[in-house]
Amino acid sequence: MTHATTSPLARLLKHDATPGLLLVATTLLAIAIANSPASAHYDLLVGTPVEIRIGELELAKPLLLWVNDGLMAVFFLLVGLELKREFLEGELSDWRKVVLPGLGALGGMAVPALVYLLFNHDSAVAREGWAIPAATDIAFALGVLMLLGKRVPLGLKVFLTSLAIFDDVGAIIIIALFYTSTISLTALLVAGGAMLVLLGLNRGRITHLGLYLAVGTLMWVATLKSGVHATLAGVLLALFIPMRTRAGGSVSPLKHLEHELHPLVTYLILPVFAFCNAGLDLRGVGLDQVFHPVPVGIALGLFLGKQIGVFAFCWIGIRLGLARLPAGVGWAALYGTAALCGIGFTMSLFIGSLAFENSGVNRMFDERLGILVGSLASGVLGYAVLRRALTRTPTTAMASPPSGETLRHPVATPSPQRTANRAASRP
């Protein structure tokens, strides 16, 4: 006989909204401390120098950069593992299921960037922040969605999760192409050599995760020294983790590592990142700072650009017969979900930390203010729209399938529920 009784803490940790609520709590704590007499201690904490030296090899950074370059590499490793799994055997393995979220992600990146540039096109320094409002924080967005409980159709969760996966791919490409510093050829060659070793391990069907993680750590150090952003090493490492064992056993190395990393990322890495990056000192802030083009462009990019881009691109795709609405989802619910995509907290803060680091101009206040305002407004609007739209199950909102194709229930596969639940811990 099994006992279903669990402690209140265990039930809380398993709740889909917990990751988002935890990020909210750590964010509010950081803001409260930054606006209290203890603000000097907060600044000292995030600025604490941390150094590792092995012979001539030296890694010396303030604590904030160890969090952003080191801990976030683990987060990107988890993102890479999820991407690989989804493309191999999950929702993204069937192209017919990825068209709608793919279009939404494309619009959700392009339109916010254009909105931001509309306000900042005349400043070379400010233009560097164009990608800040292009990212969606899936942990917050799914956390808000889960507050609506059982009324949320599974198809809507899968749509938001799949869109966030494409959004992550876009963010990875943007970081790789636009936010790298001066390249060190020697360090880059070392990173390339580490990748060849990882490829050899993968082709040799070696499944010992310790070997992959050891070589991956070396690749992270080399990438950090190369000028390419070090978090990309996490994504690259994930691509080489084998999905299956040599004998086709039941334990997948990739899925095992993904399972082990989820609680670490959800309950430690992301809250620590939020606490170290969200401390916004609002004391003595004037209207000229609030209405500076950078925070205005970020806030409106997230709040207006995201919902317009996601909804418009999805609407066009459905009207052209390229995609259809998920089962049980009407246009109002799709719009509410598009508004939720304007919650850009974690990834927006991360890209913001890269955008202005080489400009010599401190825009930290501007970017944080815009991200917080835009994300809060998007979350409130999305929740309000969805709460009203999901009070009843839509009966006629299903879009017609493409001509010549029989309408099938889009969630009649074994993986969507697991996909939505796993992604609730990810931004």
Image: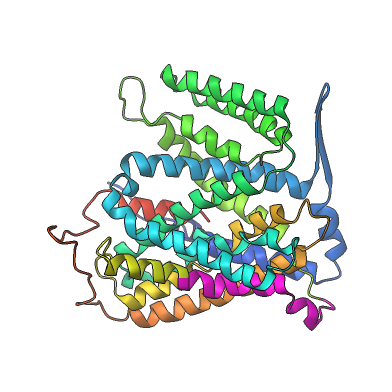
Q: Is residue 250 above or below residue 45?
A: above
The residue most toward the front is 122
User: Image point 74% across, 78% down: which residue?
Assistant: 290
What range of the chain is rendered magenta?
A: 283-308
Q: Quadrant of residue 255?
A: top left
Measured as percent of width and height from the top left, residue 9 is found at 51, 58
Relative to 426, does residue 264 appear above or below in the rendering?
Answer: above
Asked whether 358 or 411 is in front, the reply is 358
The question of residue 244 being in magenta is answered with no
Please indicate whether residue 270 sits to the left or right of residue 93 in the image.
Answer: right
Residue found at x 65% / y 44%: 71
- The answer, for residue 343, to whether it is visible in the render is no
Residue 300 is one of the magenta-drawn residues = yes
Q: How is the image coloured?
A: rainbow
* x then y, percent, for residue 359: 79, 55
Return the x and y of residue 21 as percentages of the image width and height. Answer: 55, 65
Chief SS of the magenta region: helix
**In the image, what residue occupies the spot 57% across and 45% down?**
75
- Give the mark count: 0
Q: Residue at x 31, y 44 (%)?
A: 93
- Name the spot of residue 50 as percent of width and height, x first: 81, 40
In the image, is residue 239 above or below residue 176? Answer: above
